[in-house]
């Protein structure tokens, strides 16, 4: 499966711009981490996992990380992609633990990309390009801000990776910065509001 096929499959079950933007954002972050961590030859696979990780959430939120197995199998996804998607809900809606470093990255960054995106909307620039770790940490510590983004899951992800929380926050922020315009352009090309 290539990225375009993964995007097409995502769009088959997701119509809301928010969910498609989130999939594209996580995909770009996964691609950046693949390169950074020495998995460059697998970056398209990592990107596909990022695109498809919430394939079932918009239409079947009560079956998240369960319904995806059927959808991904029907879409022709390979077993390791299905496993990665299922285990990103570990401890929430799945009892399948992340094993591979890629799966741990997805687990750690899924909620965090949402938090960073929410922070960007509150900035005068409306962008993450001028965001630093200090301002991200301030919002991270504010439990009332973007309350749907679980700090517990983010911290657990950092622990899984054996990274300091600050390291995870900084690295994810830096992974998101170069692709903000790419994501906006992609959303525009899809005819979706960004």
Image (tube, grey):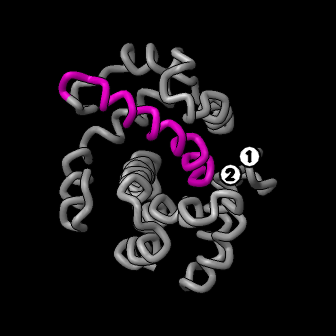
Q: Residue at x 46, y 33 (%)?
A: 115
Mark 2 nearby-residue class (10 Å; few <14, some 14–19, many ≥20): many
Q: Are marks 2 and 1 in contact (CB under 8 Å)?
A: yes
Residue 175: where, in percent of width, then height? 36, 41
Q: Please count the marks in the image.
A: 2
Q: Position of residue 59 (x, y in %)?
A: 57, 65
**Residue under the point 50% across and 36% down:** 112
Magenta segment's dominant SS is helix
Relative height, residue 39 to residue 189 (above, below): above
**Under tag 1, what secondary structure?**
loop
Dot 1 corresponds to which residue?
92
Q: Is residue 103 magenta?
A: yes
Q: Quadrant of residue 74?
A: bottom right
Rendered residue at 70%/58% (across/down): 62
Q: Between residues 144 and 81, which one lies in front from this camera angle?
A: 144
Q: Is residue 151 left or right of residue 10?
A: right
**What range of the chain is rendered magenta?**
101-125
Report if residue 167 lies within the magenta region: no
Image disc number at residue 89: 2
Query: Mark 1 packing: few (<14 Cα in 10 Å), some, or many (20+)?
Result: few
x then y, percent, for residue 78 = 60, 79
Give above or below for 36 relative to 24: above
Quadrant position of residue 134: top left
Helix or strand or loop: what does disc 2 sit on?
loop
Please name whichever residue, 78 or 86, is drawn nearer the observer in this view of the structure: 86
Q: Position of residue 117 (x, y in %)?
A: 37, 37
Residue visible at 78% across and 57% down? 96
In the rendering, which numbered label is found on residue 19? none
- State the separation of the CA atoms marked 2 and 1: 5 Å
Work out which residue is located at the far right of the displayed protein and give it.
Answer: 95
Closer to us: 182 or 104 = 182
């Amino acid at each position: 499966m290539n990225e375009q096929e993964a995007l097409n499959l995502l769009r088959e079950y997701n119509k809301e711009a928010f969910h498609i933007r989130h999939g594209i954002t996580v995909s770009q972050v996964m691609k950046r981490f693949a390169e950074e961590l020495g998995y460059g030859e697998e970056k398209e696979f990592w990107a596909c996992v990022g695109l498809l990780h919430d394939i079932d959430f918009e239409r079947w939120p009560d079956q998240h990380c369960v319904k995806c197995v059927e959808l991904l199998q029907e879409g022709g996804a390979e077993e390791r992609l299905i496993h990665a998607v299922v285990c990103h809900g570990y401890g929430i809606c799945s009892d399948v633990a992340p094993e591979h470093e890629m799966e741990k990255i997805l687990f750690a960054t899924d909620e965090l990309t949402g938090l960073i995106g929410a922070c960007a909307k509150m900035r005068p620039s409306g962008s993450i390009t001028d965001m630093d770790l200090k301002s991200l940490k301030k919002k991270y510590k504010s439990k009332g801000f973007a309350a749907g983004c679980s700090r517990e899951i983010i911290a657990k992800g950092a622990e899984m990776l054996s990274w300091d929380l600050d390291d995870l926050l900084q690295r994810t922020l830096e992974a998101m910065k170069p692709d903000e315009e790419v994501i906006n352009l992609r959303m525009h090309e899809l005819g979706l509001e960004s």
